[in-house]
Image (cartoon, rainbow, N blue to C red):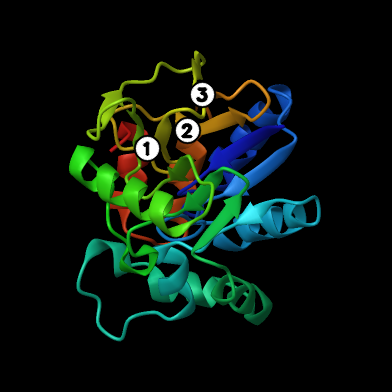
Amino acid sequence: MRLALMSDIHGNIQALDACLHHARAQKAQRFAFLGDMVGYGADPDAVLERIMLLTEEGALVLKGNHDEMAVHPPAEVKNVGASTAAWTHNQLTPEQRDWLDALPLSAQLDKVLLVHASADGPELWRYVYDERAATASLDAAINGWAGVRYVFGGHVHEQSLYYRGSTASLMKFTPQPGVAVPVPSHRQWLATVGSVGQPRDGRPEAMYAVLDTERWQLTFHRVPYDHGAAAWAIRAAGLPHYFADRLEKGR
């Protein structure tokens, strides 16, 4: 099976549609959305409409921290991440909010564990940004879920791949877009699949990955999309221009 792994769409319908089109061209047979479908971007309702339809085809969907905030906006805005929560909340229908609220924080698919942030306390939204955090997440998954050899998440808005071979320590591998990486199950693997709707590595192209569970290969992808249109929609909606600017700069 070819499983398309997408995370951190953040209300960016232009990026989501581009990645869905690209994934279908890669012969993806199933989709997994790893959280943060809303927040920051101008089209949270359209994004959820697309994804909710895909669940009828067997798509797996997890809750992210921005999804949680959109359902339960904080009474006081204390950080940038919370600044669009109330606006997003008001764009969603009651049915969409109920659907988001009921989503799980993790899901197991045979040898694969899907999370938004870290498997080490998924509800704490820890960032897996280095070998130490990756080790904690992978260990929690291996010890807490029977048969798991792979952990896939998002949250950090960058693409990365870690693996454990014959030693206890993890090694980090820098993936190249479009190049299939063998990920055999005699090793243990953790990957962050990047952000569909808000890349932060200095490039504006959307990010996602495809896992081939027959060959056990993982391919990271970068997908050009009309980020100018996504930025214009943010400004037109009256949201902070900062979120539009960062789409254009990949920051």
Q: Relative to 146, is 75 above or below?
A: below
Q: CA distance from mark 1 to mark 3?
A: 28 Å
Dot 2 or dot 3: first in sequence order is: 3
Judging by the rendered image, the residue that carries numbered circle 2 is: 206
In the foreground, 164 or 201:
164
Q: Which mark is residue 13?
A: none
- Badge 3: residue crowd in 10 Å (few <14, some 14–19, many ≥20): some
In the rendered structure, the answer to whether residue 21 lies left or right of residue 138 reads right
Residue 67: horizontal and vertical position, in percent?
A: 47, 66
Q: Relative to 25, is 72 above or below?
A: below
The local secondary structure at tag 1 comes to loop
Residue 31: horizontal and vertical position, in percent?
A: 66, 43
Judging by the rendered image, the residue that carries numbered circle 1 is: 199
Q: Nearer the viewer, mark 2 or mark 3?
A: 3
At x 38%, y 63%, the residue is: 122
Q: Which mark is residue 184?
A: 3
In the rendered structure, the answer to whether residue 23 lies left or right of residue 64 reads right
Which quadrant is the N terminus positioned in? top right
Question: Which image quadrant is residue 167 in?
Answer: top left
Kindly give the residue lying farthest to the bottom in the view shown: 75
